[in-house]
Amino acid sequence: MTSVTVRTPAKINLVLGVGAPRDDGYHPLATVYQAVDLFDHLSVSPAADEEVTVEVCSGDPVDAAAEAAPGDEVVADVPTDDTNLAVRAARLLARSTGTTAGARMRLRKSIPVAGGLAGGSSDAAAALVACNRLWGTGLSPEDLQELGMELGSDVPFCLLGGTAVGSGRGELVTPALTRGRYHWVLAVSAEGLSTPAVYDETDRLRSGTPVVEPVVPQALMCALRDGDPTALGRALSNDLQSAALSLRPELAELLDIGRSCGALGAVVSGSGPTCAFLANDEAHAMDIGVGLASAGPFSAVHRVVGPASGAAEVDG
Ligand code: C5P
């Protein structure tokens, strides 16, 4: 086999309930993930034994103008050494299957870095799927899920895709019963937020107050089951939002602008700083996108649709 290309999605959290930190430092979560059609693409080809390398560039794979440009905003913060999550994923797969095969990886990023959209986790998911195919290691989706858990809390969901309930520290995922397609507008900030910093700030803001075990609200599951965007918009929530707004006060204004443009719901995505706005349909999403773009102290607006599929092979 000469090369394999895998497309892997961004995620948003429709609800993110966060409990008090566990003994291992992680927080128990009750979340509902939705994958959206903003994708990174990872191509892998054979390399010398035990050699795993990654090259990172930005842009849409069908956009010929989007050739690798060192210093591109979206890729500037992505390491290309052994700390890169795709490299770690490939090495973990090699170790756990006993293969000595190598991989040359080329990662084309569209998912913003440190944006609360699971970009790094999604790249790890892509590397597991791509290298498993390239190397013929034959692990099942369930085996890949197990490896994914070791790499990051969001990796199992990025493998699964769709809409799913997440528990544990987010790594235990169960597909959710949903109907319909949802139109979102994502407002991406120029500067990312550190996930551990947002969790730490959440703990700081809550110190001295009892924290209850998080549960997924019934209203949100009903909205998804009914395919009702208005009810879904009302049910969006995120326990990390106060901390994200504390670290980035300007996001409060952004959320207000989206609401004033008629968004059915507005929420910080995961640990932020990306904000997600739910629209009625494609035309409404365009209106919200235009309203946000003319207002914003942020770098980009993406119109996306969910649910999208998880990390999967596509034609090169
Ligand atoms: O699992 P992952 O490596 O993606 O998590 C990144 C960081 O986010 C963790 O090191 C931890 O600080 C924080 N985190 C957490 N509780 C979770 C998930 C992540 O505190 N459930």
Image: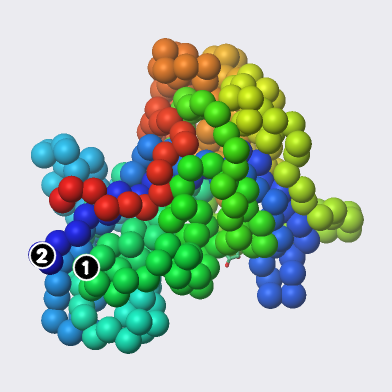
Residue for point 62% across, 31% down: 224
| Numbered mark located on residue 134 in the image | 1
- Name which residue type carries label 1: Leu
214, 110: nearer the viewer:
214
Residue 191 visible to an observer of this rendering = no
Side (left or right) of 148 relative to 58: right
Q: Quadrant of residue 229?
A: top right
| Numbered mark located on residue 302 in the image | none
Residue for point 18% across, 48% down: 315
Question: Under tag 1, what secondary structure?
Answer: helix
Quarter of the picture for ligand 1? Answer: bottom right
290, above or below 154, in the image: above
User: Which x, y percent locates residue 206?
Assistant: 80, 54
User: Which x, y percent locates residue 118?
Assistant: 47, 52
Label 1 crowd (10 A; few <14 / some 14-19 / many >=20): many
- Name which residue type carries label 2: Thr
User: Which x, y percent locates residue 30?
Assistant: 70, 51
Q: Quadrant of residue 44?
A: bottom left
Side (left or right) of 262 relative to 286: right
* Residue designated by label 2: 2
User: Which x, y percent locates residue 228?
Assistant: 62, 22
Residue 271 visible to an observer of this rendering = yes
Side (left or right) of 272 relative to 128: right
Q: Are marks 2 and 1 in contact (CB under 8 Å)?
A: no
232, 110: nearer the viewer:
232
Quadrant containing the N terminus in the rendered view = bottom left
